[in-house]
Image (cartoon, rainbow, N blue to C red):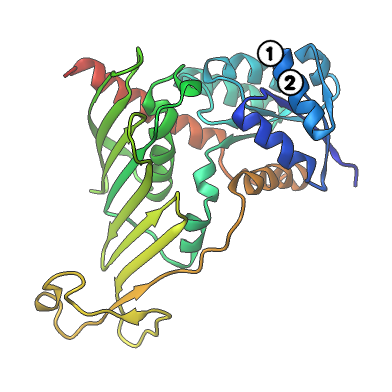
């Protein structure tokens, strides 16, 4: 089988990581990299033993697929150019700056039979993957994604920079249409929203409360899921998971029964039932490497895409609704 020829567009923080990991993928041939900052491109190319292209078109003439790791505001034009050439695209999140741009990319990709996968990398986080043995049907989601300030992501708001991760996971877990959104946020250091909170309700009755900030001293990437007879805590940063759940009649558990006092006076409400505490085994993997593998496999096998452009577009649509709420009801 011939190796897939791939290139990387954008050689900043994420582009450099993608270049390094592509170099080790046995199913691809890393052709080279391009960045509008030629010094960055040449440095990354030298480090990982590939060619630095001076012009984007020259790179695209030599590849079958690309990683697009440029600033969000450039995603649409670059991706459109690639797709019209028949080049498969792994686009870093968010897919585009606007929902309408994402919709247009999806339309063009279908017409040209091009694959688009979007880099919502938390889908590949080992902590989330460890929960595949459970039937996740959350009725309430509480998420906190807090980061120290980084100048490289200020071309978009904290909603598109950080909250978009949790929006994607929320929509993936709660398979229902969004009913209402209540949001607020403030700009502190940039011209866009730096801190935001959104409360989202769904037609099936589920609720999600998402908080994101890029101005904090102690970073946090946590999500808590509450569903019928279970509470699940996910720490994406530490890649740690805790599960508290009621044991079904006759069911065996790999965990251990916990004292009721660990969850308060819960024994008064659930007499004659056993609560178990479980820590699913989290297998250490590189999430970006795993998303790259999924992308290549979808091209080779013509199989479903792990994180589709349609999924990413819906996340953008919800992000836009949150943004509009903040504009409509400023603090």
Query: Is residue 250 something that shows in the picture?
Result: yes
Mark 2 neighbour density, 10 Å: few (under 14) some (14–19) many (20 or more)? many
Q: Residue at x 39, y 79 (%)?
A: 255
Q: Secondary structure at mark 2?
A: helix
- On the image, which quarter does residue 149 sit in? top left
- On the image, which quarter does residue 86 sit in? top right
Q: Which residue is mark 1?
A: 37
The answer to whether residue 101 is above or below residue 134 is above
Q: Residue furthest toward the right? A: 2
Q: Nearer the viewer, residue 181 or 39?
A: 39
Q: Residue furthest toward the bottom? A: 250
The answer to whether residue 110 is above or below residue 288 is above
Q: Residue at x 84, y 29 (%)?
A: 50
Q: Where does the image place residue 168, in percent across and percent down from the top left?
A: 43, 39
Q: Residue furthest toward the front? A: 217
User: Is there CB contact under 8 Å for labels 2 and 1?
Assistant: yes
Q: Where does the image place residue 270, in percent across and percent down from the top left?
A: 15, 77
Q: CA distance from mark 2 to mark 1?
A: 6 Å
Query: Is residue 34 something that shows in the picture?
Result: no
In the displayed structure image, the side of residue 7 where residue 188 appears, left or right: left
Q: Nearer the viewer, residue 203 or 251?
A: 251
Q: Which mark is residue 41?
A: 2
In the displayed structure image, the side of residue 89 where residue 150 appears, left or right: left
């Amino acid at each position: 089988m011939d190796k897939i020829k791939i290139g990387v567009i954008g050689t900043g923080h994420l582009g450099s990581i993608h270049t390094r990991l592509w170099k080790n993928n046995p199913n691809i041939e890393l052709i080279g990299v391009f960045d509008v900052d030629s010094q960055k491109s040449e440095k990354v190319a030298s480090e990982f033993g590939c060619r630095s292209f001076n012009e984007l078109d020259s790179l695209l003439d030599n590849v079958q697929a690309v990683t697009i790791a440029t600033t969000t505001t450039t995603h649409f034009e670059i991706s459109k150019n690639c797709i019209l050439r028949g080049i498969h695209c792994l686009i870093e999140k968010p897919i585009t700056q606007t929902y309408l741009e994402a919709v247009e990319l999806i339309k063009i990709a279908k017409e040209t039979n091009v694959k688009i996968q979007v880099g919502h990398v938390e889908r590949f986080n080992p902590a989330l993957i460890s929960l595949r043995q459970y039937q996740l049907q959350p009725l309430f989601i509480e998420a906190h994604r807090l980061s120290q300030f980084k100048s490289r992501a200020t071309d978009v708001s904290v909603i598109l920079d950080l909250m978009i991760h949790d929006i994607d996971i929320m929509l993936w877990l709660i398979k229902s249409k969004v009913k209402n959104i209540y949001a607020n946020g403030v700009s502190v250091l940039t011209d866009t929203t730096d801190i935001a909170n959104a409360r989202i309700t769904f037609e099936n009755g589920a609720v999600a409360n998402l908080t994101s900030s890029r101005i904090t001293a102690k970073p946090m990437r946590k999500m808590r899921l509450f569903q019928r007879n279970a509470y699940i805590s996910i720490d994406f940063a530490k890649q740690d998971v805790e599960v508290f759940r009621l044991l079904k009649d006759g069911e065996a558990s790999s965990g251990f029964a916990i004292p009721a006092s660990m969850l308060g006076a819960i024994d008064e409400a659930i007499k004659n039932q056993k609560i178990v505490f479980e820590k699913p085994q989290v297998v250490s993997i590189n999430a970006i490497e795993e998303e790259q593998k999924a992308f290549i496999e979808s091209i080779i096998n013509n199989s479903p895409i792990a994180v589709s452009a349609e999924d990413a577009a819906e996340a953008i649509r919800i992000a836009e609704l949150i943004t509009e709420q903040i504009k409509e009801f400023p603090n």
